[in-house]
Amino acid sequence: MKKIIIWIVVVVVAIWAIVAITQNSSKNSIVTGKPIKIGAILMLTGVGANYGEHSLNGANLAIEEINSKGGVLGRKIEIVAEDNRGDNPSTAISAFNKLTSEDINLMIGPNWQPSSTALAPLVCEKSVIMISMSVGGSDFTKQCDFTFNTYPEQVRLSASLGKYVVGQGYKKIGLIGSQQSWEKEQFDAIKKSIEDNGGKIEIAEVVSGTETDFRTLLVKMKKANIDALVLTNYTNEDITVRQARDLGLKPQVFSVLIDDATIKDAEGALEGAIGGSYYMPTQKFVTDYTKRFDKTPDVSADTSYDAVNLIVEAIKNTGKTDSESVKEYLKNKKIFEGASGSGTFDEYGQVVREPHYQKVVNGKIEELKK
Amino acid sequence: MDIVPQLIVNSIIAGAIYTMVALGFNLIYGTVKFFDLGYGALTAVGGYAVFYFYKGLGLNIFVAVILGVIIAGLIGFIIYRFVYSPLRERKSSGMVLLVAALGAFTALQAIIAILFTSQFQTLSRSAGTERVFNLLGGIITETQLIILICGLLIMVVMGLVLKYSLFGKAVKAVGDDEEVSKIVGINTSKIIGWVFFIGSGIAGLAGILVGFDTGIEPTMGLSLLLKGVIASIIGGIGNVYGGVLGAFLLGFIENFGIWKISGEWKDAIAFGVLIIFLLFRPQGILKR
C-alpha cells in the first residue's frame, strides 16, 4: 500500500514537472510574431458602465485600425479587458494583478478617480504603463513617471466655467455641490474661480453624495433670487434640475458636466443649461466610430482611442515594448494630437486643452460659439 | 413665493416618504421583533419591477404598480419562509437574524444590479409634463401628492385592520407573545408570513413612488431604510401611528434644520435626533 502511494506521488510530481517545463519553454519561445497585449481596466458593468463601454469601443477601434495596417513591429495588437465593476477600487486592484500576472506591462484605464487612486501605487511599484482616458483629477499622473492621462484635468474646466459664468454678467449665483470627492473638487474649484473673478455667490450648498431631496436648498436659492444656478453634483444634477423646475425656479443653469444620459434623466429640465466640456472629438473619429459600433461615441471613447494610439506610437518609435522605453518616449512628448483634439502634455503626462462650452438645445448638446 | 408654506410642504413630502417606509418596517418589527434590514432592498425590488413592466414591457402603469407591489411582497415572504423562519425555529439570537437580514439585503441589491446594472433610472414618462398643485401655499407635484395620500391611506387601513379585524388581533397577539399565541391556537407561522408579505408590499410601493418622484438605483434602499428606522424609533417602534408621527416629525426637523444651516448637516441632524431619543425617550413618542 505504502509503495503504491509513493508511486502515485512520484507520477503526479513527474507529470507536474513535465507540464511546468513545457509551459516555461513555450513562454520563453514567445517573442516575435505573438501579439502585443495591452491591458484595459474599465468600468464595463455597474455605475458608469457607459464610460467603460465607450472606452472599450474606442480602444478596439484603434486596435482594428492598427492591425489592419499590419500592426506594429510586425506584430498584432491585442486588448485584454478587465472589468472593475462600477469603479470598485478593490476589483481594479484584482484586475491589475491578473493582468500583470500575464506579463502585461502596458495598460489603459481606469475610468474614474477612486480606482486610479487605488491603482497608482501598484502601477508605480511594478513600473507598468497606465494611461487613463477619463480620470478627471490631476493626482493620478503626479504619482510617478508611469502614469499618464489623455483626459485633461477637470478642475481647470471648472475654474474656467466659473470665470465664464461671471463673464456672462450673472450677479446672483447659487452653487450646489456634494461631498463625493470628484464633485467636491469641482465645487471648490468653481467657487474659488467665481470669487477670484469678482462674482458674488449668494448661496453655496454641499450635500451628501447620495442626497436626492434638494427642495429646501432650492427654496433658499429662490428666496435669494439667484439668476444663475451652478451645479457640480453631477451624480444627481438631473434630480436637482427637475425639483428646481417643479418649484418654479428658473435661473440659468450651468454644470461642470452635461452628457446625454443626464439630459435624458432630467426629462427636459436641463433645457437651456450650459456646461463646460473637453469633449470635442474629430469628425473622422465620430464617423468611424458610428459606422463601426452603430452608435455615436460619448466621453472617453475618443480619449481611449488616443491612449491606445499613444502606446503604439511609442512602441513604433522606440522599437521596444518594455514599459521603461514607452515611458521615456511619452515623457518626452510635448505636443498631443489625437481623435479627442489637439493640446499639449503637462510636465506630469496629462493632456492640457482649452475647454469649450455647450448648451442643451431641444434635448441635444450644441456647441456654443465663443 | 412664500418660504414658510413651501418649507412646510417640503417637510410634508419628506415625511410622507418616510411614512411609507416606516409603516411596513414597524409592522414587521412589531410582530417579529428583529431589525429586518432586507426590508430596505425590497423598496428597490418594487421600483425595478415597475421599471421592467412599465418601461420595459410597456404594461399599463396601474398593472405594473400592482405587479411591483405583489413581487416585493412575495420576495419578502420568500426571504421570511426560507431564511428567517428556519432561523427563528432554531431560536437563533437577534444578532444572527440581523446578520441574515444584512445578507438578504446585500444579495437582493447585488441581484438587482446584475439584472438592471447600477445605473440610475427614472420611472416617469411624463418628461416635465407632471401636474403641480398648490398645497397650503406651497408647491407639490402629482407624484408627491400620491405619496402623501398613499401614506395616510395605508396608515388608516392598517390601524383599522389591526384594531378591528381578526387578522389584526392575531398580529397584535403574535407581537405581544408568540408562544402564548401558539398555545391559544393562532397559526403564528401563517400570520407572520402574511405580515412579511404585506410589510414588504408596502416597502415595494414606497420604492415605486420614490422611483416616480426622483428615480431608482439598486442602492436606494439603504438611505430609505435608515430614515424609516429613525422615524419608527422616534415615533414609537411597533406603533403604526407612532411611525407616521415620527416620519413627519423627522421631515420637519430635517427641512427646517437645513433652512438655517447648510444642507450637508441634514443626515447629522436626523441621526442627532435619533440619539437624543435613544438617550432620553427610547420608547419613542407613542408607546406600542
Image (spheres, coloured by chain):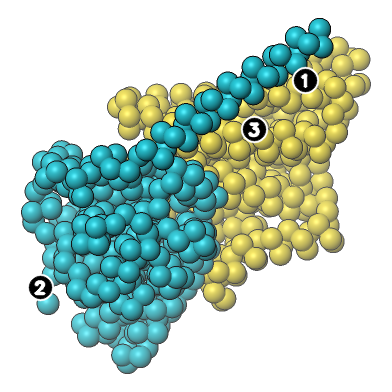
Chain colours: A cyan, B yellow
Question: Can you identify the residue that label 3 sits on?
Answer: B104
In the depicted structure, whether residue B258 falls above or below residue A108: below
Report x, y in % for residue A63: 21, 45
Residue pointed to by mark 1: B86
Instruction: Say if A24 sits above or below A164 in the image.
Output: above
Tell me the kind of residue under disc 2: Lys
Task: State the count of labels.
Answer: 3
Name the residue beneath numbered marker 2. Answer: A369
Q: Residues within 10 Å of mark 2 (few under 14, many from 20)?
A: few
| Cα–Cα gap, marks 2 and 1 | 67 Å
Q: Secondary structure at mark 1?
A: helix
Residue A76, percent across and down? 23, 42
- Residue A247, picture quadrant: bottom left
| Few, some or many residues within 10 Å of mark 1 (<14, 14–19, 20+) | few
Quadrant where the C terminus of chain B lies? top right
Residue drawn at x 64%, y 32% as measured from the top left: B104
Residues marked 1 and 3, same chain: yes
Q: Chain of mark 1?
A: B
User: Hey, what amino acid is under mark 3?
Assistant: Ala
Position of the N terminus of chain B, as image quadrant, is: bottom left
Kind of residue at disc 1:
Pro
Residue B200: quarter of image: top right
Q: Is residue B205 above or below residue A113?
A: above
